Amino acid sequence: MKILVGIKRVVDFNVRVRVKPDGSGVDTDGAKMSINPFDEIALEEALRLREAGIASEVIVISIGDSSCQQQLRTGLAMGADRAIQVDTDIHLQPLAAARTMLAVIETEQPGLVILGKQAIDDDNNQTGQMLAALWNRPQATFASKVVVAGDTATVTREVDAGLETIEVDLPAVITTDLRLNTPRFVKLPDIMKAKRKPLEVIAFTELAVSNDNNIQIDHYAPPAVREKGIMVDSAAALVTELKSRGLL
Amino acid sequence: MERINKIQILQKELPDLELLADSRSLQIYGQDWTRFRQPDPLAVVFPRSVDQVQALVKFARLEKLALVPSGGRTGLSGGAVAASCELVVSFEKMRKISEFNPLEASLKVEAGVVTQALQAYAAEQGLFYPISFAAEGSAQIGGNIATNAGGIRVLRYGLTRDWVEGLTVVTGAGEVLELNRGLIKNASGYDLRHLFIGSEGTLGFIVAATIRLAQPPPPQTVMLLALESMPAVMSLFHSAKVYLKLSAFEFFSEQALNYVCQHRQLPQPLENPAPFYVLCEFDSDEEAALAVFEQGFADGNLLDGVISQSSAQAEELWQYREGISESITQFTPYKNDLSVRVSKVPEFMQELDQLVAESYPDFEVIWFGHIGDGNLHMNVLKPETMEVGEFERSCLLVNHAVYQLVEKYAGSVSAEHGIGLLKRNALRFCRSQAEINILRQVKRVFDPDNIMNPGKLLNDE
Amino acid sequence: MSKILIIAEHNGVELNNSTAKCVSCAIATGGEIHIAVFSATGNEIAQQASELSGVTEIINIQSADYSHALATTIAPEAALLAADYSHVYGPSSTYGKDLMPRIAALIGVNQVSDIMAVKSSRSFQRPIYAGNAIIDVSVPADQTIVATVRNASWPAAETGGSASMREHTATAERPTHTRFVELASEGGDRPDLQSAKRVISGGRGLGSQENFAIIYALADKLGAGVGASRAAVDAAYVPNDMQVGQTGKIISPDLYIAFGISGAIQHITGIKDAGTIVAINKDSEAPIFEVADIGLVGDLFAIIPEIEAAL
């Protein structure tokens, strides 16, 4: 079966982002860009499934302008078989991104779609779930373990209460959590090989996806500064204070 | 009894100076990262100002009280060890960062500022303090200056010395000197700040410094490469310098890698083991990195390699190098920190390797270091069943031959760890008698009563 | 006037207090508040929900299909119900994060994730870049607002209410392609440091590897994860995967208690997003007191037993 992996080009997680003084956005000029860490994990899982003989092809897909080809090439160097760039200058919100993925799914007919649970820039954590809804297929979010056998996947998910295991019929959407795997390093010889792998560019406008019902961002601000703390004079006073704050 | 008396006199004369003398504090503050001596200080004091430090020195002169400066105590040559009833002077209460000057890209630090705090502060201001090494989370800038700390980016940014624009010291004679005062140009005679930098606490206390900061580097990429031999490593270094804007070029042996993987529970980074590994960091440039790789592969030097795709991966790869020291600490290693001129590295290592194989057939030897600086860390691991004293004696015996080899290559017995306590007897292998005589005389100028870290760097006469 | 539907979270027995937090957010939004309870046998839970102050109606939807809270089974009916509401809220717990976007897609709208504050009935504040930027967002008038409510930003609504109860029979198709297998709760082992809601850390002040036992013991009593400062790791009191800080783990528990940690910058970087920072140190000038929300100067070896006694 084919596995489709969505990857997003984001500001490297180590970069300290600063809000522009006029509040109009975040300053990312000259910042190092990388594949969204959760998406790297998604790709790693797909590659392992192919190496185990469960998948036959891993396709990486990214939505954005031509700069995201850098991340697609990295995906190919990690081991993906081919790449698709849906070309657009518009920053799509989760619903339109999900609709776009669905359009590609209709052509590619993958058995599994693996996405990172959220992008570390907008922290929405929606696209995977939305895609599953529009596709009318199962969603297995925040996966920390994936086992595929025949037509079903057994996915263990990290939830507040612990670890929940669900079984889903394929095709399905899985979103990855941090503990699912540790992505492999790219090997230098593979970067060379990646240059010869196919990278297809599809114009967003060709896909007849409606980009409506967007949320408006009105203003960006830096985080609030922590208020000054208090001192207590005994362990008993500390426990009382914590209880009154609902923390114990 | 005598100790208690001394402490009492000290507390009477300097009542505002905080002091600890409980056994746990004496244990913690009396030792650095070496374990070859039992700490045994008189007490530990915590000055908060230059005035307090000066008053302390004056007192110490009168009372003939030995003083040991104490920063992060992450030293590797015993320079901060107090094993003979000295008074440890900890700078942990003097940790202010001040006078940040955006135009000059400089700031002032008290000696107790932790190196990593300085790095973080610089980053907050959009600048970069480039000196970086494994112990930076605990080491203090005063200690860094006293040892002229180098670390992983010397190749690109030089040593601590290159970033100190001003130094406030209290000499062993009790004088406060403001050296160079932050000037970029000052052609007014001998630059005394450079005597104090690397003086290992033997001339006086470093209490504050004006530090220059760099522009942050562009995004960096890290490669971890597997190689057949040391000549291959040095050959790779040549081509890396041609194609890449290098920030760091490190090497380590297969056994070093195995210990790190074991200790930190990391997977092997490459498919097949190799005798040597290089970790290099450079301004991101995939084409250039590929060129280096292709050339190395074609020459038969390079066996395999991986490249980071994000800063998270870059940090992961660095762990393989940075975790080495920690992973072998449990074996009470006898550490060698040698340097020769870069062009002599292959030859030197070959002879050294042979010498070591012949002389330490029963000991395990771990190789790693800042090979781009010509700096080699050779660590001999203590077998589990051997007692520390016996191990040290055996190592000293063989190290004599090692030092003679270093001397033959006109190298240094201490590239960056300093002489401290553990390498005093080796000083003669890289400094001439004439030089050593001058060092002694210089010390007498700044520390006439020999109270400043006595017994460190120079043997008692 | 706004009409807000909250999708309740529960474990089959008890209403989760995340629902009460959704109510607080709904109250701040303004409008009539209803809560939908999807369960197999939920009368108990519906009853608990009805006691939340400020709520007008509880919609009790029972079906064997809802015996486990699966997003794929609940979303279709929730999307149908949503047609009558201007807002649909869920908690920003793993349950809500899993469910609400599916509902949003079925309705055909984007979601506002992690509401930290309400600016007006259609305008909210939420964090991006892991909280390093806060954005004001607004949803245009013709769209249903679907949102998750950030747990750490809202108090639980008071009890004392008496909402009316309405039974509702689900009509939407419940897919069978997703099936619950099991839930392994985190009862046994200590919670993972990276994700624990409470974390206790020890620093150099502990003095030895052996002394760390008192930290582990207190953590077990509080159901907390255990961390350590760089100094404690360097001194080999604990393994380095317990290091909290810039070069260790960056964590954001609701409660962080630091014992014997001086608070160097790199450690603070690791905890600056924690909800409440508590520091115990015998040095009143330890830098950690500059960032702590609650500070206590004293000997940790005496204080820890006292804390345990007061719990």
Image (cartoon, coloured by chain):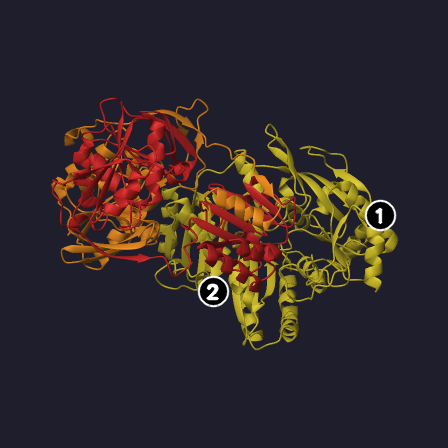
Task: Give x and y (percent) for residue A187.
Answer: 33, 53
Quarter-of-image position of residue A137: top left
Question: Which chain is displayed in red in the rendered image?
Answer: C
Quick one: SS at disc 1?
A: helix
Q: Of the numbered discs in the image, which one, if any, rests on residue C33?
A: none
Q: Is residue C65 visible?
A: yes
Badge 2 crowding class, 10 Å Cα cut-off, few under 14, some 14 to 19, many 20 or more, is many
Residue shown at 19%/29% (left/top)? C84
Mark 1 surroundings: few (<14), some (14-19) or many (≥20) residues within 10 A? some
Tell me the SS state at disc 2: helix
Q: Colour of chain B?
A: yellow
Q: Is residue B21 above or below residue B115?
A: below
Where does label 1 land, which residue?
Answer: B58
Q: Chain of mark 1?
A: B
Q: Position of residue B387 (x, y in %)?
A: 62, 76
**Residue B259 tag number:** 2
Q: Colour of chain A?
A: orange
Q: Position of residue B160 (x, y in %)?
A: 62, 45
| Quadrant location of the N terminus of chain B in the rendered image | bottom right
Q: Quadrant of the C terminus of chain B?
A: bottom right
